[in-house]
Image (spheres, rainbow, N blue to C red):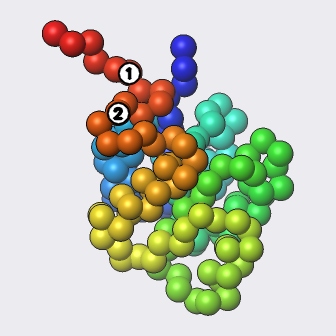
């Protein structure tokens, strides 16, 4: 049986995790939610996401530290990452870009901006079919 596509959202804000869960659901993805990089590490051990959405600031460490760790791992380095943060300092954004992120989405953002970024990343990876087709890994409904 084919594994469903998953989005891993690493953000300490539960409202933003729910927003990404809603968007992922619209595209046929399951969502894994982590309120911290430590929790995200635990989830990564048991499940491989198609995309990661990552915040920058956490009480215990930065999203940049977590991203750097991902990029050093043979197992996780190819996972596309969308950074979603209110931090707009040029130096910080450049450091994330050097680690190979796909997008840097500045908070506050609109639902449509988030949807576009997620769709773009999935499409670029060949994981999002053309309109009207079923996403890979999702269950197709039988006609009645």
Residue that extends furthest to the left in the rendered view of this protein:
144
> Vertically, is 139 above or below 143?
below
Q: Residues within 10 Å of mark 2 (few under 14, many from 20)?
A: few
Image-quadrant location for residue 103: bottom right
Q: Quadrant of the N terminus?
A: top right
| Residue beneath disc 2 | 133
Q: Residues within 10 Å of mark 1 (few under 14, many from 20)?
A: few
Q: Do the residues under discs 2 and 1 have CB atoms within 8 angstroms?
A: no
Q: In whole angstroms, how far apart are the C-alphas of marks 2 and 1?
A: 12 Å
Q: Count the marks.
A: 2
Q: Nearer the viewer, mark 2 or mark 1?
A: 2
Query: Which residue is rendered at x = 47% and y = 57% of the image?
Result: 120
Q: Quadrant of the C terminus?
A: top left
> Vertically, is 103 above or below 52?
below
Q: Nearer the viewer, residue 51 or 87?
A: 51
Residue 58 seen by the camera? no
Marker disc for residue 16: none
User: Helix or strand or loop: what does disc 1 sit on?
Assistant: loop
Q: Position of residue 48 (x, y in %)?
A: 63, 36
Query: Which residue is rendered at x = 35% and y = 73% of the image?
Result: 109
Residue 24 seen by the camera? yes
Image-quadrant location for residue 49: top right
Q: Nearer the viewer, residue 104 or 16?
A: 104
| Residue beneath disc 1 | 139
Residue that extends furthest to the front in the rendered view of this protein:
130
Query: Which residue is rendered at x = 64% and y = 65% of the image?
Result: 101
User: Helix or strand or loop: what does disc 2 sit on?
Assistant: loop
Of marks 2 and 1, which one's residue comes earlier in the chain?
2
Q: Position of residue 17 (x, y in %)?
A: 41, 54
Query: Which residue is rendered at x = 76% and y = 63% of the image?
Result: 68
Q: Position of residue 142 (x, y in %)?
A: 27, 12
């Amino acid at each position: 049986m084919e594994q469903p596509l998953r989005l891993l959202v690493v953000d300490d804000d539960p409202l933003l995790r729910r927003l990404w869960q809603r968007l992922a659901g619209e595209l046929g993805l399951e969502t894994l939610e982590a309120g911290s990089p430590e929790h995200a590490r635990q989830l990564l051990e048991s499940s491989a996401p198609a995309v990661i959405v990552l915040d920058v600031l956490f009480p215990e460490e930065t999203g940049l530290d977590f991203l750097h760790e991902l990029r050093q791992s043979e197992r996780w380095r190819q996972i596309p990452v969308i950074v979603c943060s209110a931090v707009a300092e040029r130096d910080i954004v450049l450091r994330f870009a050097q680690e190979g992120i796909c997008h840097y989405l500045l908070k506050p953002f609109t639902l449509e901006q988030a949807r576009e970024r997620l769709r773009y990343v999935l499409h670029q990876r060949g994981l999002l079919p053309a309109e009207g087709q079923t996403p890979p890994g999702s269950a197709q409904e039988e006609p009645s």
